[in-house]
Image (cartoon, helix red, strand yellow):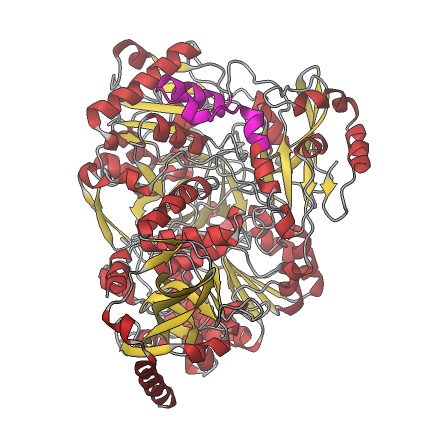
Amino acid sequence: MSIHTTKTVTRRGLLKGATALGAFSAFAPALLRAGAAQAAEAGDILSGSHWGAFNATVENGVWTKITPWDQDPRPTPMLEGVMDSVYSPSRIKYPMVRKAFLENGPGASPENRGSEEFVRVDWDTALELVTNELRRVSETHGPGGLYAGSYGWQSPGKLHNCQNLLRRTLNVGLDGKFVNDSGDYSAGASQIIMPHVLGTLEVYEQQTAWPVVVENTDVLVFWGADPVKTNQIGYVVPDHETYAHLEEFKKTGKKVIVIDPIRTETAKFFDAEWIPVRPHTDVALMLGVAHALYSEDLHDQDFLDEYTAGFEKFLPYLTGESDGTPKTPEWAAEICEVPADQIRELAKLFSDNRTMLTSGYAIQRQHHGEQSHWMLVTLASMLGQIGLPGGGFGLSYHYGNGGSLSANSVILSGLSDGGTAVEGMAWATETGAASIPVCRIVEMLENPGGEFDFNGTRATYPEVKMVYWVGGNPFSHHQDRNRMVKAWQKLETVIVQDFQWTATARFADIVLPATTSYERNDIEHIGDYSLKAILGMKKIVDPVFESRTDFDIFTDIATRLGAGEAFTEGKDEMAWIKGFYEDAAKQGPAKGVEVPKFDDFWDAGVVVFEVPESASQFVRYADYRDDPLLEPLGTPTGKIEIFSRNIEKMGYDDCGPHPTWMEPIERLGGNEPYPLHIDSGHPNNRLHSQLCGTKIREGYAVAGREPCVINTADAEARGIADGDVVRVFNDRGQVLAGAVVSDDIRPSVIRMYEGGWYDPVNAGEPGSLDAYGDVNCLTVPISTSKLAQANCGHTGLADVEKFTGDLPAVNVFEAPAGG
Amino acid sequence: MRYLSHLAMTVTLALFLSTPTHAQNPPAVSYLDGTVALSAAPDHSMPPIGKLLVTAPLRPLSREGDWLRVSMQGWTQAGAERAIYAAPGIRVLHAVLSSSAVEMLVFSEQIADPDTAQLWTKTELQGWIKTPDLKPSLRDIWARAEPLFAQRCTACHQRRIPHHYTANQWTSHLKVMGPRTGLPKDDQFLIRAYLQYHAKDADRLARAAVQ
């Protein structure tokens, strides 16, 4: 059921739609009253998630069946886990407080976090504790004492945006006195370097439309990108449009190359040419291709002259004139294990054909990760196809279904963070940085008062005593778990608000049970880039156990802080949702879109917008190519900066003024403390750590553990058979995993997806064996460089052995003691 | 060379045309709050020759009914004279002109930006605007910009810190993110200007504005 804006919406059509909702329509009138929305006792309800829009069947108030939205072109099998997340044993049922904290107060035996039992309390007790702690820490330690840079893939929905709700609470209730974060764990390096190179973030921006690529691109390269895998999810509700376009491209039979240590889902889909590059050496490979282009005069000097700045300063490095090392294909081959002849062939192939170089985030989540995409853009500049249909580079085809067609939609706002002026953060200079690069949290805890560099500035770490985390699982996404466990012990108070017992919740002092998205009403777009539709995310069932919505919980806390009215602005759940919609609807006339009335929209469940013809012809950077002077890029020169004077001025030893190959702290063929590289890519059957606590895990777990893919030869050398439980280890940690022996991974590389739930056998004891398989027990905690201060989740070596000891039970998917 | 001789000629022309009153006692600068069309004459029947953007620093010269004749100083990059920016190398856009209107610009000093070696020329623009909303200081404009930024740019993502990016980078960010606010174009320009004047290079921008 949906409303399409392609036709004029008539009252009759809408009424017909309402009838087609069947049993549910009997309840529809109740939903139209702000504040009176109720879950249905029975019927089919349209709603949405990070995994797509879906219909939920409810019987006797229980959600019994999930089916994809009929307009989803390629639903993900993960939907089954979406339903299970409501009822799984990992659900947090009641407000809980760690026993020692309840008895002895803040800071009581922090070493027992993660192992000590929890005590059930009522909501009033829990919220009084939370409010008192917010006040106490703020008054005792000042604004630097509280960290609320709560980060992670919270559920979609414009209202129950829990991280914003937290900041809103603190902005209106504590005068904005808290430490925030900046950047993210996904694309932290690229989103800092790309503005220096192209003026913009690149990694979260619409791509040349897929139909243009299908028609014009001759060679499609996926350089550390696996869009078949990663477009299953969306930050809003995904449209899954990419898949149809990939099918179209496949039908043309044109060349697809996958450069990756793993024969990815995308490689299999296209039956692509697979170049199993040695991990962490992509910059060297790109330099080798660049050298071949230059030495064989295959580069586009006219493009470099007209549209880029500083190639002449990069050139002496490429030729070796400046450092004595020509970056020849032979030099590159030695590092990246792609034969020199093949590197030359790539140079010729790329320059002879319309080539689209797409890349994902993996190669920038590495030590010196800034260099990867900078060098990729430099390579694309030498090919001279940026701004041409189907040429150039793309850093977001793998994310948010980038390249799917942008609809002519009205756009929802959402709940703001409640802060009024930027000047409100003036306290920052006195007590330390008001905002820290998100992945530096452990360093911040270890080193209060310590200085750090970041993108040309220097700031001081505040002395944080309390953390409030919502909508995220740092005990999954942060690197070097054991170091983190220790740093967390420095905190006096940890509050976690979630709907399931993640490792982060287990390591908290106060745990507040939130509802899932499916137990509340909300509103969201379908399509991260396409903005194809607006979806009513209707409540499917009433909150289970004692869970409450994020909006309710924070309304209560804000009220206790004396700022309830400022927080709610006098509006309840449905009034806010209606407000967002009606605010967006006002854009209709200017955009020539007839937007249905809210009640009609809510009744139908979704409104789908028309895609204008121009959307299918969009070419990224065509405007710049057309008029570089009047459409300048946001760089100092207004051009693509192969050499950045601004970065040069920062004088960093780990990020120079042009793309450079620098040895990482660990890599195969370089500094090699252990023999196997760990590929910790995004999972195929989860969203980071989300849904790990649901029954879909049973479909991929091996011997009840997180899978570890290992090459046949490496397995054989270690006496490991498919299905064995193995121990993966290095100096940073040790985890159990289930071996998957395969030739879809190159030798000397193992793959464990990030997001496996951390399950220490002896929680709180640094170095404890992890019984399930959280790969971030093994990855390196350093930052990419002083420039971006981003994480290096794709850097790290380990070894694997068959596990022969007494097999510890996996406990992380059940509630902890007392819970 | 051709460009320089053209420049010399316009400079001479400008000196010849300038009126003694303004030269002795120039009126105070006000800042445009909004986007307005710029016309060559106080006349509706003629198509506009360009537009002035929010925060454009204007000196009122004369009035005719609802129309105000204004003068604005800014900087253009050699070859892109249709775009007038706040400072050399800092692309805070104050005016966009039609190709033909470039002829009306009065050029003066030319400098090479030390960071990029690009040539920038100081320029003065005159024209007519209708019932403009002028504010005595930029602070008066920020009073409207701040809540707009705080409310509309924190709904989908974490609040961005203005001084984490340069003024030029903010142009590119707003080009992408501006349309996603669903706000009218004028409000997107307002947010952009606010972020640019609070950017990493805001000090350099302020110094250039004083000069």
- Depicted A683 relative to depicted B113: above or below: above
Lateral position of residue A403 relative to residue A762, left or right:
right
User: Residue B198: image x %, image y %?
Assistant: 31, 52
Image quarter for residue A178?
Answer: top left
Image quarter for residue A640?
Answer: bottom left
Residue name at image x 48 percent, y 53 percent? B186
Residue name at image x 60 percent, y 37 percent? A582
* Residue range corresponding to the magenta coloring: A549-578
Q: Nearer the viewer, residue B81 or A775?
A: B81
Q: Nearer the viewer, residue A7 or A82?
A: A7
Locate the N terminus of chain A and report the quarter of the image it occupies: top right
Residue name at image x 63 percent, y 52 percent? A591
Locate the C terminus of chain A and report the quarter of the image it occupies: top left
User: Residue A346: image x %, image y %?
Assistant: 51, 72
- Depicted A306 relative to depicted B188: above or below: below
- Depicted A430 relative to depicted A254: above or below: above
Q: Is residue A570 magenta-colored? A: yes
User: Which SS does the magenta portion mostly show?
Assistant: helix
Work out whether residue A656 can be spotted.
Answer: no
